[in-house]
Image (cartoon, helix red, strand yellow):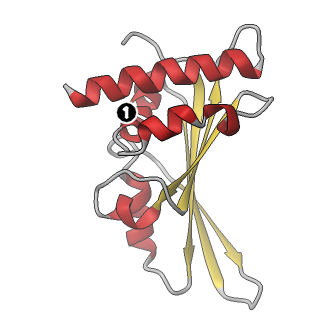
Amino acid sequence: MASVPFHYVDLRAFSYATEDEKRVEDALRHYLPEEFELERAESKGHHGDRIVVLSARVENADDVRHVLARLAEAPEVDRLVDELDDRVTENCEFFVHLDKQAAFSGETALGDGITFRAKVEAYPANREKAVVNAEETLELLADDDEE
């Protein structure tokens, strides 16, 4: 596949005081190309507990393809495609929540813990065109994964 119709992908996960930050980083890295740089920001929770926000913005086409290919490994990828109307905003952003524990184990699954947000290319920039582009890309990548 030559190009992917996505401008970028943002991934984000929170490491709460009760969690091992390295494990959360490893979970996020499941979706990222090797040696990809993570942003790290410290915050405080409602009760003053430490929360570390780990995030990455993937913009290079090959790296975006890598992240999307990982997403397409989800057993629920067909469900994702069916739900694109609900998952793509008027701003052509595609949202998915991914299972942090599964990612730590090297698996891709829908769930909680990792936020995936992607800006879908669409010309003209409208939600309907973005849904079509996201659908075609996910189906192609899912088919590649099955071979």
Q: Quadrant of the N terminus?
A: top left
**Mark 1 lies on residue:** 69
Residue found at x 36% / y 62%: 102
Q: Position of residue 7 (x, y in %)?
A: 61, 24
Give the amino acid at mark 1.
Ala
Residue found at x 64% / y 18%: 121
Nearer to me, 26 or 145: 145
Residue 1 sits above or below residue 104 on the image: above
Q: Quadrant of the C terminus?
A: top left
In terms of secondary structure, where does tag 1 sit?
helix
Residue closest to the far left: 147
Residue found at x 38% / y 20%: 140
Q: Position of residue 19 (x, y in %)?
A: 47, 81
Q: Quadrant of residue 134?
A: top right
Q: Quadrant of residue 32?
A: top left
Residue closest to the far bottom: 47
Residue found at x 43% / y 38%: 77
Left or right of residue 55, residue 19 in this image: left
